[in-house]
Each structure stands twice: as structure tokens, then as C-alpha cells.
Image: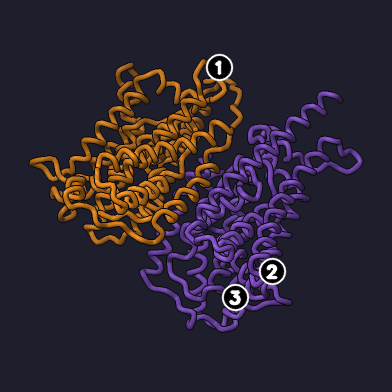
Chain colours: A purple, B orange
Amino acid sequence: MTVTATPPAAPAEATRGTRLARRAFLARELGIGLALILLVAVTYAVNPRFLSAQNVKDLLLGSTILAILAVGQAVVVVTRNVDLSVGSVLGLSAFATGTVFVASPGLPIPLMLLIGTALGAVLGAVNGGLIAAARVPALVVTLGTLYMFRGLDYMWATGKQVNAADMPAAFLRMGTATVLGVPVLALFAVAVLVAVGYYLRHYRGGRELYAIGSDPAAARLSGIPSGRRVCFAFVASGALAGLAGVLHAARFGTIDANAGQGIELNVVAAVVVGGVAIFGGSGSVYGAALGAVLLTTIRAALPVLGVNPFWQDAAVGALILAAIGLDRALSARVGRSLRERTAHV
Amino acid sequence: MSERAAAARRVLGSWDVIMLIALVVVSAVGALTIDGVASPRFWRFVVLEALPIALIALPMTLVVITGEIDLSVASVLGLTCTVMGHLWASGVTSLPVLIAVSLLLGALLGAVNGLFVTGFGLPSLAVTIGTLALYRGLAYVVLGDRAVADYPTAWTTSAIAPIPGTTIPWMILVLAALAVVFAVVLHATPVGRGLYAMGNNAEAARFAGIDVRLTKFWLFVATGAMSALAGVFWTLRFASARADNGSGLELAVVAAVLLGGVSIFGGRGALLGVLAAVALLGVLRNALQLAYVPANTLTVITGALLIASVVGPNVAGMLRERLRRRRSTAPTVSPIS
């Protein structure tokens, strides 16, 4: 699984091995992309209205929040950690958005986006700080903060909810507005995806996240500040969940303390379907985002295909199993041919 | 320090004992300060509520000790409930048959998990997130959004019937018997020692002649069967089979197992601590409800306990290590960690 973690070397010294690894990287994303295209094509053939402007808009809107969360989760998962608290962070941020807007309706929207992101970053720093400083497993800490953050959300909301009528109209318009047929919210997701994807691929800090996930001990020995990097990954995941919370508020308008409840396993599923190895070191945020879009599209496509909607969850589950199975087969093949080639050198 | 004092400190300092003490202290404080905690009715509800979690926590402890995890347990419970409900609604009226079919189904679902994890070598976290969705989805396929609720009263009352002369449900005896079986396997047999060995180092365990794959496979089967048993109990206790029965329960079980002192990385933990943790959470939840503390506070407390259970020992260990290093004047090679 560590094979594809090989950082892309400078073209001049690119060995056949790294080229192969890159091809495998492409194969993963291409595979999910193809599956997505196939699904859309079949569904379109059955019912052309599946690709009507309105439906495409709904699909993109539906994928946005899951995709942003999946990008953040992918950053954490490549370091061989997991962040189960994202749903609760989203919930807190969404409720904070509603509360702030009720208190000061004139607040500029960009400032609100910033506040939500910052709140998420602080919550992420709680996770990252505990994990890095006390050296405790991420699964346990973020399961703990999943409960704590959600509990705080309930205590804060005390059963009340913020209604769409209390929100600034401009903010709610952002939730449904489109630019050239593409929802504004989806543009947020694309911006996040490109920025994080570029950082992970071309910055030292990003490459080091993969190194940590491939082999934590080796990463430490080679002088990578593991604790700080992992902490950063959790801050990033928290910040993106915070941003997702604000977008959730914009999209749905009405918010209670349950926003985002139970979404964490969906997010992990999207990341896994997107070809990010659950034990770290390989995969990309593009794959994770594609995974999120694929999961959303399946849920939307099944009713159109005439499949009983009760089959949705089962189909998603089967897809997850197929994705990790394929991924294992693929990485085993790459690993084998890499070993063969290096043996000949 | 004499050897006996050292041994006493080891016992008192062990996590299981800390959990037991916490359980006793919380129960005592609750009984003294909150009206109703001392009543037998209170304990009846604690047992009824904690039973499904405890039933699943038994095999889950063993699974986590081997370094794996099973997140599909609540979905296995849900699917079992719906299949049982469906069979009842379509004319299967023998309770033993229903129970047997349910347990078999649970074992089969567990075997699918086990096959993916041990046969194909896939990470259990990812596999069981997949089957979590798959099994819950199948539960919806079986019953949709219907509920089957017309079980004979004789069944539903006998499922929660108390031990004669007490208020404690007799099902706790089933739990106790199963707990003894699991405890003996884990703590007193070569198989149990093997579980710790493969949790610490699967490779080394394999070289020591332990069939890691086969053992883990059967553990997943056992987890499925126990989740199904919890499902049967759930169906009869609430007299309702619904596709969303027990949804979200997997995290409660994992939280109890981890709070009970089992390391998520495997190789460490004991059943006593886990059972004490299940009971502690149950008592806390019910006592706080009686004290009119909102359920949300308990959510926060559960999370905080969980974090404290891993952060506490780690920080204590780090402080001890630092003290020791400062005390020893001899130059030592600092461990890389």
C-alpha cells in the first residue's frame, strides 16, 4: 500500500517505478471516474431527465458538503489516522452560524464563512493537540470528541432551532444560487479541492503527510515533525468541517442540534471508495471527492433506475466493499511488478 | 518496596480495578444523592438497557484485542431484528426456530466480515464500515419502513421477566454465563493468549504457530452471532422489529470497550474492565436521567471519559518516564518515540 506514496520525483530522474506508481495513481481516480460516468450514462439512458439542469444542480449541491468533508478526511487518513468528529464539528458550526446571524443579521457573509472555518479549526486543534501531545489513538480521541462536540451542541441549542426566516436572505440565496448553472456551493468545494490537492502534491508539508502515513517510525527517524504535521491535518479537517457547517446552514436554512449527525461514517466511506487507503500513505483528495460524488449520485440514481429506494444503503455498502477489494488487488499488482523491476536493475 | 506492596499496587493500579472502583463510587454516590437510584426498579432498567451493549461488547473485546474492529454489529442487530420480524409475520410461530435462524444469520453475517478481513486481507475498519451500510441497507430491504410488533405477550414478557424474588431480569444470567465463557477463553486458554499475541504482533504470532487468520475469522463469526442474540433480545424487549433498531449502537459498544481499558491497537485489555465500563455508563446514564440532568450532558461525559481513559494513562506514563530520566544520572539512550 505504500507503493503509490512514492513522491513524484523530478522528471529527469523519474524511474520506471515511479512512473508505474503514478500510472496506478491515475488508474485509481480514473476507475472511480469511469464508474461515475457509467452510472450517469446508464441512468440517463433510462431517464434523460436525470441530466436536466435542475437535477444536475441538485446532484452537485447534494455532493458539496460530503465532498468538502471527504477532502478534509482524506488529509487525515493519508497520515494513518481517522477523524470521526467531523459530523459533530459540522453540527456545532452550523448552529453557530444560525445563532450569529440571529444576533447580527448584517454580518458580511465572507466573515461568517471565516468564523465557521475558524471554529472548526479550533475544534480540530483540540483533536490534533490531544493526539499529537498525549500520543493517543485518533480513533478513540475523535470518537470521544464526536460525543463531546455533539453534546455541547445539544446543550447550546437546548431543543431550539434556528429557522430560515431568521437568516439573512442573501445568505440563503447563496445556498441555491448558481453561476453558469453550477451552484455556488459546489464552487466552494472545487476551490477547496484544488487548493488542498495542490498542497498535498507539491508542498513539502503535504508530501510529509504521506510519508507519515506510509511508515510513521521511518518518518520520525528522517526528521519529519510528525506530531506537528498530524496536528495540522486534524486542524485542516476540522476547519473544512467548520466551513461545511456554514454551507449546510446556507443550504438548509433551518438548523437544529442534529445537523450532520451520523455523517462521519459516510465521509469515511466516500474516502475509502475514493481509493484512499485506510491505513494511510496513499490516495488523493481528488479520489475522495469523486468518491463523495459517486456515493451521492448512486443514491440519486437508484430511484430513477426503478430500484426500490430501500436498496440504497445496501448498494452503498456493496460499493464500499468492491472499492476496497479492487484497491487491494490493484496495489498488490503494482507492488509485485515494482519488486520485479527493481530486482532486474 | 516489598514484593507484596508492589503486587498490591499493580492490582490497584490496573485499569479494571479503577473501573470497578469508579462503578462502585458512582453507584454509591448516586444512591445517596439521587432519589430513586437505590430502588430495585432503577437496577432493573440499568440491566435492561446495558444488556445488548454488554452482549456485543463481549466478543468485541476479543476482536479489538487482536487489533481488529467490527463496526457492523449494530447493523447485524438491525438486520436480525427485521428478518426475525419478517419470519414471524409470514407464519413462523416457533420461538426456538426464530432464535436459531437469527443466530445462524448473525454468524453468517459475521463470517462475511471475517472472510473479507482474513481471506482477502482487507482492513477490518474499512470492511465493517462497508458491511455497516450493507447490512443496515438489507434490513430496510426486508421490512422497508414497516414495523412488526404483534408478538405474543408471553414472549415479550418472558424476555424481560425478572429472576424470581428480585427485580433483575433473568437475561443477566445468560449474560453472566456467556461472560464466563468469553473470560475463560480469553484469560485462561492458549487461544486467549494467542489473541493477545496477535494483537501485539501478528507476524510473530504466526511464526509462533498461531493460526491468526482462522482465529480472527471465528472471532468475527462469534461477534455476528452475539450481535444477533442482542437483536433477538432487542426485538422482544421493545416488541418491535424495525429496520433502524439499534442504529448507532456500534459506537456505544466501541466506546465501552475502549473505556474498559482495551487498547485500540490490540494486545491489551481485559473483560472485567469492559463489563465494568458497560455498567458504569449504564448507571451514569440512568442516574443522571433521574436527577433531571439532560441526556446531552451524558453525551459530553461519555466523550470526556473516553478521552480521559486514553490520555490519562499515557500522560502519567510520560511523566513517570521523565521523572525517571531526571533521577538517573547514568547516561541512557533516550528511546525514540
Q: What's under tag 1, amino acid-wise? A: Phe
In the displayed structure image, the side of residue A273 where residue B306 appears, left or right: left
Q: Chain of mark 2?
A: A
Residue, disc 2: A187
Residue, disc 3: A175
In the displayed structure image, the side of residue B259 where residue A300 appears, left or right: right
Q: CA distance from mark 3 to mark 1?
A: 58 Å
Check whether the beta carbons of the residues at disc 3 and disc 1 lie within 8 A of each other.
Answer: no
Q: What's under tag 2, amino acid-wise? A: Leu
Q: CA distance from mark 3 to mark 2?
A: 11 Å
Q: x%, y% of residue A48?
A: 67, 70
Specify whether disc 3 shares its chain with disc 2: yes
Q: Secondary structure at mark 3?
A: helix
Q: Is residue A239 visible?
A: no
Q: Judge whether A87 appears above or below B52 on screen.
A: below
Q: What's under tag 3, amino acid-wise? A: Gly
Q: x%, y% of residue A194?
A: 73, 59
Q: Chain of mark 1?
A: B
Residue at screen point 32% across, 52% down = B90
Mark 3 vs mark 2: which is more N-terminal?
Answer: 3
User: What residue occupies the far left of the structure in this picture?
Assistant: B165
Q: Is residue B196 visible?
A: yes
Determine which quarter of the picture holds residue A148. Answer: bottom left
Residue at screen point 24% across, 33% down = B176
In the displayed structure image, the side of residue B154 where residue A67 appears, left or right: right
Q: Residues within 10 Å of mark 3 (few under 14, many from 20)?
A: many
Q: x%, y% of residue B225?
A: 37, 37
Q: How many marks?
A: 3
Residue, disc 1: B207
Can you say which quadrant of the picture contains the C terminus of chain B? top right
User: What residue occupies the far right of the structure in this picture?
Assistant: A12
Q: Residues within 10 Å of mark 1 (few under 14, many from 20)?
A: few
